[in-house]
């Protein structure tokens, strides 16, 4: 019994020397602390002596008392450690109590401040591991992150070396102009191929996050690449890829409300999770083509967005975005010259382009109005993102050519339904759809928004698009994906009386000419349908959270376009094979 008491006393003394120093911070060793430690040691010694005396009377009770004393000491040390952690957190955040860290929701590239926290029962979609955006929250911070005041600054982006091959000379840059693929009779372009090497798709970004209070959080994001307007000698001696603004917005989240303003992906663009504006949470496919796929509904433009989060799995958004009434040169207008065509954006490209003179300021009537509701559910073990959206656009023209001093307005409405289902782990099925009147500009501007009828009034063109595909993260370093997509534009035209000789005919009616889009005899630029089948992969050769990652990306596509009218002996469609390869270094 004597031996047991001595062993217990030795264990207690050893625990005192082991645990007591580990609970002290390095700087907590002043005279007052030493005196306090000495007093504590004396008290421990006295207590041990008392327990030894007590143990001579009852050995079992002495051992129990010594064990209880050891437990009390350990509890005290644990409490002191908790207090030190609290003090350390307060010194970092500048608050008296620990701040509540935002809970990450959704994509692995994260939108902690913008998307609502998720419960275990509801898991949003994860974006494919192709980008360079970093996690939100302390545990996922990029090593490049730095702090100014209470704000966290996170740089991002990547450096690209891209090779582009097209089987016909479409004359595109990093984005394929699907609406102008040459027919095999369109020589010499159809008899040539094109090959380009570029670094223009390299990208840089900066995300800034700052907590205002426990319930209010601010985030700002800017992103740029080098696909801006090109000078005339851009591809000759210096390959001067011009720096351009892709995204620049600020978002403030307060409780269930969220307000965003600036240039962002349109609210009409499909999301992977919630209604987040962060690029990784937006579905723009995993393609290298900077025009993505034929049929994707999207825009990047200025706007203001208000989002309400009723629950952690449901979001409702309302946006006012920049309008731009669009009618390409393929549409036939009444009259001659550019009287009506000059009132619309005709899609002319860079400022040095030949069509720039016919692209004046566009007289838009009011902002485009977009509403959208998104749901993120869990169906068994399968994550499901579903969203529905609507678009309202109005157009206006002035007529002093046919009916003097009159104006015409027309309003078109469109709607979309999108879904993203995790069929099994890391394998996502994707379905996007869009249809309505006056929404062609959001389908890659592949068709007209409206036409001008023979009497000078406007008519909205019906158009639709869709995407079906999959994305499969086969391994942590290998992503495989494929999509089939398409866009459709209805024909709309009218008969304009003509006194020309010989008498013209329109749709078999003599003495009339056709104005509008898609009529018999129209140019083969009046596209009825554009389709694309594409697949690709992303292979990560090397990745390190401190140094970034090195990837190889590939895209193979086959695209076709079919006109409304095919003349006798003319090809019924145009087609092209498109290949992209890319070596990418992603910032950590």
Image (spheres, rainbow, N blue to C red):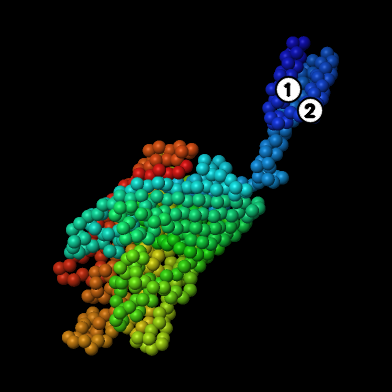
Tell me how many marks there are: 2
Q: Position of residue 285 (x, y in %)?
A: 39, 53
The residue wearing badge 2 is 31
Q: Position of residue 406 (x, y in %)?
A: 41, 86
The image quadrant where one finds the N terminus is top right
Q: Is residue 125 shown to the viewer in this render?
A: no
- Between 258 and 316, the one lying in front of the other is 258
- Between 583 and 392, the one lying in front of the other is 583
| Mark linked to residue 193 | none
As measured in the structure, the alpha-carbon distance from the residue carrying label 1 to the one carrying label 2 is: 20 Å
Above or below 541: residue 121: below
Picture residue at 70% right of the left edge, 26% below the top: 21
- For marks 1 and 2, the one nearer the N-term is 1
The residue wearing badge 1 is 16
- Between 142 and 41, the one lying in front of the other is 142
Q: Is residue 195 shown to the viewer in this render?
A: yes
Above or below 474: residue 418: below
């Amino acid at each position: 019994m004597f031996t047991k008491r001595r062993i217990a006393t030795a264990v207690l003394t050893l625990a005192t020397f082991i645990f007591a120093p580990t609970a002290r911070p390095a700087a907590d060793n002043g005279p007052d602390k030493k005196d306090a430690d000495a007093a504590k040691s004396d008290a421990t010694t006295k207590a041990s002596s008392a327990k030894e005396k007590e143990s001579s009377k009852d050995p079992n009770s002495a051992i129990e008392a010594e064990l209880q004393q050891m437990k009390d000491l350990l509890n005290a040390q644990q409490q002191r450690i908790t207090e030190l952690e609290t003090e350390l957190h307060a010194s970092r955040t500048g608050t008296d109590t620990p701040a509540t860290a935002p809970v990450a929701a959704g994509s692995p590239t994260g939108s902690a401040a913008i998307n609502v926290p998720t419960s275990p029962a509801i898991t949003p979609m994860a974006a494919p591991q192709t980008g360079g955006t970093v996690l939100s929250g302390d545990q996922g911070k990029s090593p490049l992150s730095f702090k100014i005041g209470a704000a966290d600054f996170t740089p991002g982006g990547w450096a690209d070396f891209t090779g582009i091959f097209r089987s016909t000379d479409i004359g595109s840059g990093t984005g394929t102009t699907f609406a102008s693929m040459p027919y095999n009779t369109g020589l010499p372009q159809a008899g040539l191929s094109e090959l380009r090497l570029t670094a223009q798709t390299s990208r840089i970004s900066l995300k800034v996050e700052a907590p205002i209070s426990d319930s209010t959080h601010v985030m700002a994001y800017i992103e740029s690449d080098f696909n801006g307007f090109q000078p005339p000698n851009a591809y000759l001696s210096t390959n001067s890829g011009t720096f351009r603004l892709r995204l620049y917005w600020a978002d403030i989240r307060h409780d269930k409300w969220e307000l965003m303003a600036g240039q962002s992906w349109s609210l009409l663009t499909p999301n992977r999770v919630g209604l987040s504006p962060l690029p990784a949470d937006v579905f723009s496919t995993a393609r290298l083509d900077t025009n993505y796929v034929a049929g994707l509904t999207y825009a990047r433009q200025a706007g203001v967005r208000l989002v309400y989060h009723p629950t952690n799995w449901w979001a409702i958004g309302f946006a006012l975005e920049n309008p731009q009434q669009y009618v390409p040169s393929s549409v036939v207008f009444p009259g001659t010259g550019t009287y009506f065509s000059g009132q619309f954006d005709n899609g002319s490209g860079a400022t040095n382009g030949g069509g720039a003179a016919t692209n004046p300021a566009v007289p838009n009537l009011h902002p485009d109005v977009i509403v959208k509701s998104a749901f993120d559910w869990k169906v068994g073990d399968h994550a499901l993102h579903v969203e529905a959206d609507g678009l309202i656009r109005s157009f206006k023209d002035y007529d002093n050519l046919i009916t003097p001093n009159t104006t015409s307005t027309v309003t078109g409405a469109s709607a979309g339904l999108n879904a993203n289902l995790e069929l099994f782990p890391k394998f996502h099925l994707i379905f996007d759809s869009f249809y309505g009147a006056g929404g062609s500009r959001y389908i890659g501007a592949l068709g007209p928004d409206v036409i001008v009828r023979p009497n000078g009034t406007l008519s909205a063109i019906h158009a639709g698009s869709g995407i079906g595909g999959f994305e499969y993260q086969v391994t942590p370093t290998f992503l495989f994906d494929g999509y089939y997509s398409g866009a459709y534009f209805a024909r709309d035209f009218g008969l304009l009386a003509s006194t020309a000789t010989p008498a013209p005919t329109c749709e078999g009616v003599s003495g009339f000419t056709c104005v509008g889009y898609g009529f018999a005899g129209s140019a083969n630029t009046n596209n009825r349908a554009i389709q694309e089948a594409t697949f690709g992969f992303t292979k990560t050769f090397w990745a390190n959270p401190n140094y970034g990652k090195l990837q190889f990306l590939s895209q193979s596509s086959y695209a076709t376009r079919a006109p409304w009218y095919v003349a006798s002996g003319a090809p019924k469609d145009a087609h092209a094979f498109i290949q992209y390869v890319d070596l990418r270094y992603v910032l950590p």
